[in-house]
Image (tube, coloured by chain):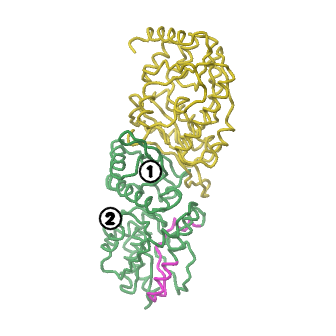
Chain colours: A green, B yellow
Amino acid sequence: MVNVEEFIEETIRRIRDAAGGEKVVMALSGGVDSSVCAALAAQAIGDRLVPIYVDTGLMRKGETERIRSLFPDMNLRVVDAGDEFFEALAGITDPEEKRRIIGERFVRIFEREAKRTGATMLLQGTIYPDRIESEGGIKSHHNVGGMPIDIEFTAVIEPLADLYKDEVREVAGGLDLPAEIQHRMPFPGPGLAVRVLGEVTREKIEIVREANAIVEECLVEEFRPWQCFAALLGLGTGVRDGARLHGWIVAVRAIHSPGGMTAEPLLLPYETLTGMVSRITSGIPGVARVVYDLTPKPPATIEYE
Amino acid sequence: MVNVEEFIEETIRRIRDAAGGEKVVMALSGGVDSSVCAALAAQAIGDRLVPIYVDTGLMRKGETERIRSLFPDMNLRVVDAGDEFFEALAGITDPEEKRRIIGERFVRIFEREAKRTGATMLLQGTIYPDRIESEGGIKSHHNVGGMPIDIEFTAVIEPLADLYKDEVREVAGGLDLPAEIQHRMPFPGPGLAVRVLGEVTREKIEIVREANAIVEECLVEEFRPWQCFAALLGLGTGVRDGARLHGWIVAVRAIHSPGGMTAEPLLLPYETLTGMVSRITSGIPGVARVVYDLTPKPPATIEYE
């Protein structure tokens, strides 16, 4: 990408040309990629863009409300699908199986909703590293793109397919999107499900969602990490009022990354870390322990599953 | 304890008086408590002390060899019982159940071996905090002491029952025991089994044993923590040579403690931490991630289960 203004202008023209007079559907996750994609397409084709937001029950705290308020003028469809996902995930412990089920379920719901809109084209926020990692086999789930979708679209439009994440953020700036979107961290397609080891349950997702919100409050503004989040590793022993109990072990991960392909853990001030630990253990019933992830990528991935 | 020399002199006399001409058996774990106890009793009654060391297969790296070489002149019996323990633990995931099975198995083996010695008395390294925590119900396994033992001993001798850990270390110094024993960190009765979450397998114990050895090498001499160790939390994703894989998540815990009742994590220099992380992930095949435990006690316990 040579120049942001030029890129925006040309991309809007390209989307308008590609769409013709047709309706275009897209999965809007609220991440920077799909948000930039939606903003570009809205300028290109207005109401003929129909963004679908699937609330999987595995989203971050307040995500659904936030998306509604961020795109008040769009022709947005919000699908409340938490029950479907939790049902499909009951008893599943294998990480690949979890990802597959979530991707599959997501695509089926998206298909159902997309058909209702009568759209003939698909818009996707795929970026360059997504394509590379798909080819290398490292990720097994990407938005809608990773799964075969059972609709005969006349075209699939991927306006960001040649950009790196940092370039997408520049475009967000050029589009005057809110700073909150522009600086938004990547969030995995399968959502919080890959931030709990093993079976996905409502209880585990509730806890990791709360912990994640605390981590973001403590770190995002002050340290601007590439990504920071909480994960739930399992049950360990704790002690409260002299009695032994079992409580969840929360891991905190905060990393710098040149584009997501490799990553280094943030070496945060201990004052920040201990304050965050105390907020998590005192604020979330059932959490007995907090650990901080010190592993680069490789050998660890950024996410936990 | 007023004075180390006085304590040693009086305790040796007390043990000699209590033992009379009888044989005394004890479970020698190699920890500072049982080692001090053994050293005192050896001075008091010589060969009539029969220490039994049960190698549960859940001990630290090189532990059995170390014990043999530390007490070359003692009437030591070493029992190789790893197979028995792994068999008894197969399929067991509940932490309390794991502890119970290990305690039970340990006592049965100890009974069997103790009967063979013809000893009529039992010597135990119980210290003051053990008694407190047993009463409070926080721990469910202590050496042999926590489990009812099916031998009619004529007496149970507990020479350290009124001492705190630091006082036991002073006594170790007064007895001229090797510095290695004197500064030895507490090690849980159920061994490495409480440092792997969930089911105990040979693979998990092997990995946590190697990780634990690295943690001790990196931290013990330089930082003199109350306790430092590695634990195995579960499987997460990693990446090697561009391919996605599942690898173990190792937690490192290093704490200061005023006697074990409460604890604070060591805020280690990041250089030390990242060096240790790199040694663990590159040195132990199958480990993809290392986290550092930042939780005080309470709300976490020192150990993981």
Subunit ID for the residue under disc 1 = A
Check disc 1: other Cα within 10 Å, few if <14, some if 14-19, many if 20+.
many
Mark number displayed over residue A180: 2
Three-letter residue code for mark 1:
Trp
Q: Quadrant of residue B27?
A: top right
Secondary structure of the residue carrying tag 1 is strand
Q: Which residue is drawn at 39% across and 75% down?
A: A8
The quarter of the rendered structure image containing the N terminus of chain B is top left
In the figure, A183 relative to A39: above or below?
Answer: above
Alpha carbon distance from label 1 to label 2: 30 Å
Q: Name the residue under label 1.
A: A248
Foreground: B305 or B122? B122
Mark number displayed over residue B304: none
Q: Which residue is drawn at 64% across and 12% down?
A: B47
Tag 2 or tag 1, which sits nearer the N-term?
A: 2
In the figure, A204 relative to B42: above or below?
Answer: below
Residue B259 spot, x, y in % from top left: 40, 28
Residue B72 on the magenta span = no
Which stretch appears magenta? A108-134
Residue B151 spot, x, y in % from top left: 61, 26
Three-letter residue code for mark 2:
Glu
Residue B286 spot, x, y in % from top left: 62, 48
Circle 1 or circle 2, nearest the eye: 1
Query: Is the magenta region chiefly helix, strand or loop?
Result: helix
